[in-house]
């Protein structure tokens, strides 16, 4: 355990809203507007050196009455230091989260997937299209209020 | 005007060409939209999602145990690794540590899966480059391993073998001998294919210096697994954060240098040898003992457990999770001499029990029916394992009920396919085939 989350909190006392260490996964919830700055900092910082964005996803907390509704979850890994850190930002339907595409190119696809599945917008994303679903699809299926059995019309080419 | 002069006057413009969605050289359904200048790829865009089956949404609808068959269908070439990854993530939520024997069984099955995956990948990309013989040889070797998998799990592809708290059943009689035999055969095939391919002029010319990616770009794209190791980064989850019992084995992590298709091919070939070494060591070390465990982490020998209802203590029975002796020294005890252990709150009873005695049936019912089932504590956990293509991670959010609140798979080939434009832009159209072969795209896990 490196207590990276505590170090991060000490470094950004105003921007880290919450930290926890459930099941050994060090986690920090940070202010949405600051995610780019903090991500850039942990990527550069000698101690953190988190140079790989392993995963980026979101959780819809509407059934758990979360306010705001969504959490965007980032998993980082450091190849050299061999440690991990999870960052989270909270966002509502109307909010948009700053993109990390400039720091890690893979954020492009991950953020497209989150947009596709949850309908969370990423500010500054160069190409925010649906990725797994087709462009005509309506709704965002991983939201909790999206009905599981909903059917969509078959979309074919228009002749 | 001469013909040459006329030719010079020809207007040139780039051409858009669709590779896929359904194309013999695409290992699944994926569409690459390429902009071509003659034979050179100027730019490209990858379109995925053709195999999207809503794995994550479906998982939220079912109990923790029912997710297991869905995980088989993620990477269908190495389903055992997906099973293991999911189980380890849920066990992390529970704080469970499975029995030694189960750990060894998991390692053995995972490594067998890794070999089948690499055999398929290398074989198929060799076939696409014209080396059909190598493909047939490798598929032959894969079949030896599938036979072993079938022996143990009862199925070849959709195996659902792992259970939360252990594995479905113990290894069958005579497993070790059969496994060693199959490994020896596989080794022979790998050697044969190595002789056929590694120094083959045609094969090497197609692979060398094509699909090159730098170390920095690979890390930027979050690429892991043999793909990353071919660029010279020594990152293997089994080595970096050993899970199960990987820290007890002596194995090497093959690392490449240039990050081209040829290095990826070599990495995969070497990794198969290392996987065989791990299995052989695991077979030497594997202890006897039970293969399943209760949520409190205690192994309870079947004989020590007494069925309270049979002793007349029926008060409060309706409110309790059935927890009793699965065997009751019943007729089917011989089927699982190692004893499947009891706390019935976490793992399914053996199938023999479900079908043959009322307690087993009740227990099965309690585990499977909606609103009962296993309930991990609230929280979230991420667990990475080394899949055949790279880091396979499961991120599970639990709200304390019987259903996972959110299951997220971190698919290893998603990130590689995202980097595909970097690999193919600037190359020639023909190079897409070997590059895409080495990406080893698996539709099931890419699109989920």
Image (cartoon, grey):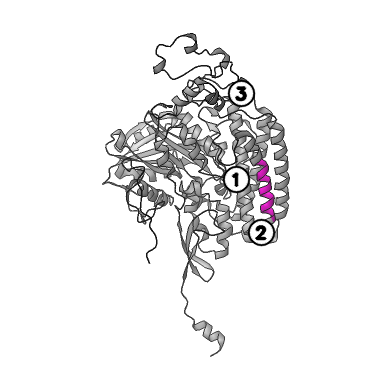
Give the foreground label among 1 and 2: 1
Q: Percent from the top left, x then y, of residue B209?
A: 60, 59
* Residue B422: % across, % down: 49, 58
Q: Label 1: which residue?
A: B117
Looking at the rendered image, the disc whose residue lies closer to the viewer, 3 or 1, is 3
- Residue visible at 35% across and 51% down in the picture: A152
Q: Name the residue under label 3.
A: B336
Q: Do the residues labelled 1 and 2 touch (CB within 8 Å)?
A: no
Prevailing secondary structure of the magenta residues: helix
- Give coordinates of residue A65: x percent, y percent: 28, 34
For label 3, the crowd category at 10 Å Cα-Cα, with few meaning under 14, some 14 to 19 and many 20 or more, is some
Q: Mark 1 lies on which chain?
A: B
Cα distance between the residues tagged 3 and 2 = 50 Å
B140 in magenta: yes
Discs 3 and 2 lie in a common subunit:
yes
- Dot 3 falls on which chain? B
Q: What stretch is highlighted in magenta?
A: B133-145
């Amino acid at each position: 355990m490196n207590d990276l989350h505590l170090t991060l909190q000490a470094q950004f006392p105003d921007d880290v809203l919450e930290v926890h260490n459930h099941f050994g996964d060090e986690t920090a919830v940070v202010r949405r507007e600051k995610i780019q700055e903090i991500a850039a900092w942990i990527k550069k910082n000698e101690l953190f050196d988190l140079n790989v964005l392993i995963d980026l996803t979101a959780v819809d907390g509407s059934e758990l009455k979360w306010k705001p509704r969504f959490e965007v979850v980032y998993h980082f890994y450091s190849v050299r230091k061999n440690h991990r850190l999870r960052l989270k930002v909270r966002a509502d339907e109307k909010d948009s989260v700053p993109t990390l595409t400039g720091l890690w190119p893979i954020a492009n696809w991950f953020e497209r997937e989150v947009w596709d599945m949850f309908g969370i917008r990423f500010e500054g994303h160069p190409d925010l299209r649906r990725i797994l679903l087709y462009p005509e699809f309506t709704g965002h299926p991983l939201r909790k209020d999206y009905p599981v059995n909903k059917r969509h019309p078959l979309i074919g080419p228009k002749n | 005007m001469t013909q040459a002069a006329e030719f010079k006057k020809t207007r040139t413009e780039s051409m858009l060409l669709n590779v896929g969605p359904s194309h013999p050289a695409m290992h699944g359904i994926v569409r690459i939209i390429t902009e071509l200048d003659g034979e050179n790829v100027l730019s490209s865009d990858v379109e995925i999602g053709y195999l999207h089956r809503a794995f994550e949404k479906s998982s939220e609808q079912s109990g923790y145990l029912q997710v297991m068959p869905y995980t088989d269908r993620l990477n269908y070439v190495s389903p055992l690794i997906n099973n293991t990854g999911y189980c380890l993530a849920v066990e992390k939520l529970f704080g469970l540590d499975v029995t030694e024997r189960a750990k060894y069984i998991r390692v053995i099955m995972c490594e067998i899966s890794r070999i089948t995956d690499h055999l398929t990948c290398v074989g198929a990309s060799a076939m696409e480059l014209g080396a059909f013989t190598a493909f047939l040889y490798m598929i032959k070797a894969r079949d030896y391993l599938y036979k072993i998998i079938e022996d143990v799990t009862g199925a070849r592809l959709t195996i659902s073998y792992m259970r939360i708290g252990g594995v479905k059943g113990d290894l069958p009689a005579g497993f070790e001998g059969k496994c060693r035999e199959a490994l020896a055969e596989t080794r022979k095939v790998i050697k044969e294919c190595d002789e056929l391919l590694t120094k083959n002029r045609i094969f090497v010319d197609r692979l060398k210096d094509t699909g090159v990616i730098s170390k920095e770009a690979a890390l930027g794209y979050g690429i892991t697994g043999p793909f990353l190791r071919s660029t010279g980064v020594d990152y293997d989850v089994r080595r970096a954060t050993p899970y199960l019992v990987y820290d007890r084995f002596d194995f090497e992590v093959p690392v490449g240098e240039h990050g081209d298709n040829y290095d990826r091919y070599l990495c995969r070939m070497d990794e198969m040898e290392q996987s065989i070494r791990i299995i052989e060591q695991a077979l030497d070390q594997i202890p006897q003992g039970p293969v399943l465990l209760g949520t409190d982490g205690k192994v309870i020998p079947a004989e020590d457990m007494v069925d309270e209802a049979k002793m007349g203590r029926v008060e409060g029975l309706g409110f309790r999770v059935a927890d009793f002796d699965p065997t009751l020294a019943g007729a089917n005890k011989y089927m699982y001499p190692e004893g499947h252990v009891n706390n019935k709150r976490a793992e399914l009873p053996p199938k023999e029990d479900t079908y043959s005695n009322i307690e087993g049936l009740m227990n099965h019912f309690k585990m499977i029916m909606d609103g009962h089932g296993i309930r991990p504590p609230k929280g979230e956990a991420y667990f990475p394992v080394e899949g055949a293509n790279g880091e396979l991670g499961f991120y599970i959010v639990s709200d304390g009920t019987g259903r996972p609140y959110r299951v997220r798979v971190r698919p290893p080939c998603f990130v590689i396919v995202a980097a595909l434009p970097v690999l193919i832009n600037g190359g020639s159209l023909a190079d897409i085939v070997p590059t895409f072969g080495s990406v080893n795209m698996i539709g099931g896990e890419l699109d989920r």
